[in-house]
Image (tube, grey):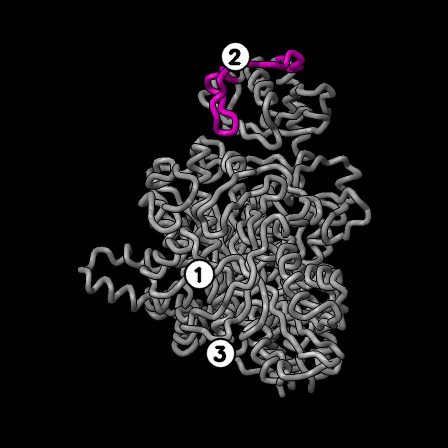
């Protein structure tokens, strides 16, 4: 397999594979659906090619008279012709045929170039046909996070209603005003899947929605393990993944992917927002004991909380991993008091948190005095659903949250009103983040004028918006993570209703929780259009 | 004469089976199941169930821990992708070999007992493997998050979980873009080509199982099922046969696990959980214990229910019952939504009960009865191929 040396030069190494260099990095392109001279329509799908190289490819294809420029589609866009920069194109027709014959023999050694049939000719996966576009909502309907999943699905249905109507709820307060009923002239339809809070099942249902139901994007999920698994799948399949409730650093850290976007905050932000509040309430001389859900989110949160509390001067007595969905945590709680720790950090979420907190309170931890201080419990990631589940036990317990329904900005009020009117109770933070994700995706498609993942992604990158309940927010281009203010909350001492269980202690400004994009490692890689 | 007849019947069965499997995308398209992921799952679980049936169907030993071998196969394949090459061939060879070794170790201990004791022992081993994979061996398995392929690591400090090395691919100078996909000498293993790869392996596995069933070895296994004590009294040492059957079915499961990683390169601990072991028992019983085709039918049915029936939400139901007047439509939707969508397990449970009560030989017995009815009550004389599992006595002890 030869590689052309010159920047921008193109070689056709087999009838369906182009190869060249840009910025000294080799790239490959797969040519789909064309035959040699006389072909009617050519579709060129590309990976990792940008800007001028597009033109070079068009030029190359034209030079070898495979296709007239008007018939060449690159990445779904018809070439404008004319502006061909590469004079160094090495292809002659004879050479194409020659190398084609050689490459056919070597085709076995070029493993990663395979074509996915784009029956529609738009050059990206599941390009919508007809007058609807299908979103895929992949949420846990069974398992430890089923409550969050049910609320996410409600929010998605509401979001679809608002997108199709071109208004209602937070769409009215959203700073971008391009959505006027439907997206790119199409109505939004949706399909659903059950992640079961298991990576395997979540990938299977996402695959079903992509392969069978023609979903243009996948969104949802209430577990970071699942989010990371599904994000990887969407990258491979070539659709956009709008992550739902996932709080692990890794989702937009070491496991980030170009096709994945997250609106929710992460444990790094929780740590930096929570630490000052913990300091002012509990002081600098504390010993923490962590109980951690044993998967990526738990590890990530334990790491972040440790990092920030140890910066305060706290000590960590122990960090014990508990299986996800354990149900009974009593055997994990008994050793806490003997450890000499005076703070229990519960890195649990959903039903796990409800169970572990309830059991910790039943074991009398909260009334204890250790090292001459009142024993304290901290739940770094809170949600209203969990607080409701744990009832009385959450009173006075600190944590952080992405959003809370009692916020009084216009966006939150509009969202709570429309959600409450439809379902009869206020939305949870899971509902809020998934609603935002659906709106943000639809808005990006409208602004991009297409559903093609690479274009939609570019529309989202660096996008600044407001009016979605979190104040001014930005989708950072470097890691596809939203940056916004973080809420530090605590369980309300005197709740006025069964939904009114959390009070906002502090709104930590974005500047305080922002970190450098390379802090968490990982690489986005190129967009995949399928 | 009789042997020649059964041989030709075997060939008809084999050719028929192969044809159906290869035409599956078209056969299943009308019920919305002709898409690659489901087809792959059907082929993979078909292999798993055929292998399971070699143990359960022929010897009557009910293993509740076969998911462990699936997990071993998956993890082994992933490590082969991460360390050696994205080509699936070495991954599959290593997976099958390791699953076989694993099965030998577990089988050597478990097969000292039979009946319920054997089942419980295998269950215990499988749960042990699950817990090891879930939390103890996280450096090898990445715990709940699951093991995934990554881009080539640029910094040797990076943990192998987060960056791959792929020695063979690197030595061959294979270019990678992002995270590469699995391939069989250049043939992509996702999508339809992935299905056909699995389908051809399923056909090969079916052929081996068929040969095995009709061989002397298979006869010995069936003898163990019908009366192990008598075999012992005639001086035949049965354990080597049992261990061989256990290892073979473990290797089938290892291959299935490997194929799961091949078609979708991620390995999670949950595929070793006891529910996964129970699922293959359901598949085999639903389809027909001791039959060759039954387990594949059962696997297809369960995978279809899991992926399609679970997706029928109320919107789909209302459009399905659209032809009814509105009140009736609402009623039908609310009744049928108890059986589909997130409660698809209910449907499966009801179906399972119906099959076990009325068709103890599984769906294959149902087919046989229909054929008998049609052909005028002639006794079907397919040796080995159709044999009711429920009539056979349980193993000794």
Q: Mark 2, mark 3: which one is toward the viewer?
A: 2
Callout 2 touching callout 3 (CB < 8 Å): no
> Percent position (x, y) of residue A125?
48, 39
| Residue farthest to the front, as pictured | A280
Q: Main secondary structure of the magenta part?
A: loop
Callout 2: helix, strand or loop? loop
Q: Is residue A37 magenta?
A: no
Binning the other alpha carbons within 10 Å of mark 2 as few (below 14), some (14 to 19) or many (20 upward) gives: few
**Does mark 3 fall on the same chain as mark 2?**
no
Residue B155 to residue A381: above or below: above
Callout 3: helix, strand or loop? loop
Callout 1: helix, strand or loop? loop
Quarter of the figure with the N terminus of chain A: top right
Residue A467 to residue A37: above or below: below
Q: Which residue is mark 3?
A: B390
**Span shown in magenta:** A67-92
Instruction: Inspect this view and state whether residue A524 appears.
Output: yes
Earlier sequence position, callout 2 versus callout 1: 2
Which label sits on residue A405? 1
Instruction: Inspect this view and state whether residue A236 appears.
Output: no
Q: Which residue is mark 2?
A: A82
């Amino acid at each position: 397999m030869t590689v052309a040396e010159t920047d921008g030069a193109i070689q056709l190494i087999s009838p369906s594979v182009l190869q060249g260099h840009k910025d000294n990095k080799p790239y490959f392109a797969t040519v789909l659906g064309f035959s040699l001279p006389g072909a009617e329509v050519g579709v060129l799908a590309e990976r990792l090619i940008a800007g001028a190289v597009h033109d070079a490819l068009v030029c190359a294809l034209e030079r070898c008279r495979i296709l007239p420029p008007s018939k060449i589609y690159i990445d779904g866009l018809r070439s404008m012709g004319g502006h061909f920069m590469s004079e160094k194109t090495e292809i002659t027709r004879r050479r194409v045929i020659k190398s084609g014959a050689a490459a056919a023999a070597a085709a076995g050694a070029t493993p990663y170039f395979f074509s996915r049939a784009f029956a529609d000719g738009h050059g990206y996966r599941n390009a919508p046909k007809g007058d609807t576009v299908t979103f895929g909502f992949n949420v846990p309907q069974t398992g430890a996070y089923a409550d969050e999943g049910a609320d996410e699905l409600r929010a998605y249905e509401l979001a679809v209603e608002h997108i199709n109507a071109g208004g209602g709820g937070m769409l009215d307060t959203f700073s971008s005003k391009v959505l006027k009923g439907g997206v790119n002239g199409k109505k939004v339809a949706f399909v659903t899947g059950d992640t079961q809070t298991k990576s395997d099942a979540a990938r299977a249902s996402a695959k079903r929605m992509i392969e069978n139901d023609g979903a243009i994007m996948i969104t949802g999920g209430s577990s970071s393990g699942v989010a990371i698994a599904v994000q990887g799948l969407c990258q491979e399949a070539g659709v956009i993944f709008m992550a739902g409730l996932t709080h692990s650093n890794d989702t937009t850290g070491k496991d980030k992917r170009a096709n994945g976007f997250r609106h929710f905050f992460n444990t790094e932000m929780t740590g930096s927002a929570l630490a000052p509040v913990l300091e002012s309430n509990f002081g600098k001389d504390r010993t923490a004991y962590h109980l951690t859900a044993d998967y990526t989110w738990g590890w990530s949160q334990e790491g972040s909380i440790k990092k920030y509390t140890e910066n305060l001067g706290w000590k960590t007595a122990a960090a014990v991993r508990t299986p996800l969905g354990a149900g009974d945590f009593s055997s994990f709680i008994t050793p806490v008091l003997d450890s000499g720790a005076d703070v229990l950090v519960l890195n649990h979420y959903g039903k796990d948190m409800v169970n572990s907190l309830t059991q910790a309170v039943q074991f009398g931890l909260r009334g204890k005095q250790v090292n001459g201080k009142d024993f304290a419990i901290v739940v770094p990631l809170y949600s209203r659903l969990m607080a409701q589940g744990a009832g009385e036990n959450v009173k006075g317990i600190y944590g952080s949250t992405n959003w809370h329904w009692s916020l009084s900005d216009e966006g939150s009020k509009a969202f709570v009103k429309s959600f409450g009117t439809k379902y009869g109770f206020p939305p949870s933070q899971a509902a809020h983040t998934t609603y935002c994700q659906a709106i943000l995706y639809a808005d990006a498609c409208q602004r991009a004028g297409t559903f093609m993942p690479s274009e939609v992604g570019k529309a989202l990158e660096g996008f600044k918006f407001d009016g979605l309940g979190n104040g001014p927010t930005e989708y950072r281009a470097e890691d596809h993570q939203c940056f916004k203010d973080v809420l530090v909350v605590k369980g309300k001492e005197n709740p006025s209703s069964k939904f009114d269980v959390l009070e906002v202690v502090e709104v930590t400004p974005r500047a305080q929780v922002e970190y450098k994009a390379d802090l968490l490692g990982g690489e986005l890689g190129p967009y995949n259009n399928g | 004469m009789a042997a020649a007849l059964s041989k030709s019947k075997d060939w008809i069965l084999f050719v028929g089976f192969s044809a159906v499997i290869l035409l599956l995308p078209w056969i299943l398209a009308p019920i919305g199941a002709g898409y690659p992921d489901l087809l792959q799952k059907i082929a993979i679980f078909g292999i798993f169930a055929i292998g399971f049936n070699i143990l359960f169907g022929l010897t009557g030993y009910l293993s509740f821990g076969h998911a462990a071998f699936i997990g071993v196969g998956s993890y082994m394949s992933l490590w082969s992708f991460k360390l050696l090459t994205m080509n699936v061939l070495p991954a599959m060879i290593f997976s099958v070999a390791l699953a076989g070794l694993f099965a030998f170790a577990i089988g050597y201990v478990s097969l000292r007992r039979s009946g319920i004791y054997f089942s419980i022992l295998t269950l215990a081993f499988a749960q042990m493997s699950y817990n090891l994979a879930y939390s103890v061996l996280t450096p090898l398995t990445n715990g709940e998050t699951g093991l995934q392929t990554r881009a080539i690591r640029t910094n040797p400090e990076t943990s192998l979980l987060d960056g791959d090395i792929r020695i063979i691919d690197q030595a061959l100078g294979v270019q990678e873009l992002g995270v590469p996909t699995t391939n069989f000498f250049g043939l992509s293993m996702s999508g339809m080509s992935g299905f056909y790869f699995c389908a051809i392996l399923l056909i090969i596995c079916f052929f081996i199982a068929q040969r095995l069933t009709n061989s002397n070895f298979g006869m010995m296994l069936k003898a163990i099922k019908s009366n192990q004590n008598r075999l012992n009294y005639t001086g035949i040492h049965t354990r080597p046969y049992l261990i061989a059957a256990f290892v073979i079915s473990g290797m089938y499961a290892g291959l299935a696990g490997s194929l799961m990683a091949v078609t979708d390169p991620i390995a999670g601990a949950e595929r070793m959980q006891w529910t996964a072991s129970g699922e293959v028992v359901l598949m085999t019983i639903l389809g027909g214990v001791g039959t060759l085709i039954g387990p594949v039918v059962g696997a297809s049915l369960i995978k279809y229910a899991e992926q399609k029936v679970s997706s029928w939400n109320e919107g789909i139901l209302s459009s399905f019952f659209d032809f009814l007047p509105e009140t009736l439509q609402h009623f039908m939707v609310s009744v049928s939504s108890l059986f589909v969508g997130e409660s698809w397990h209910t449907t499966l449970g009801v179906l399972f009960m119906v099959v076990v009560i009325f068709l103890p030989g599984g769906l294959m017995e149902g087919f046989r009865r229909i054929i008998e009815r049609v052909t005028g009550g002639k006794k079907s004389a397919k040796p080995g191929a159709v044999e009711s599992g429920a009539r056979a006595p349980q193993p000794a002890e």
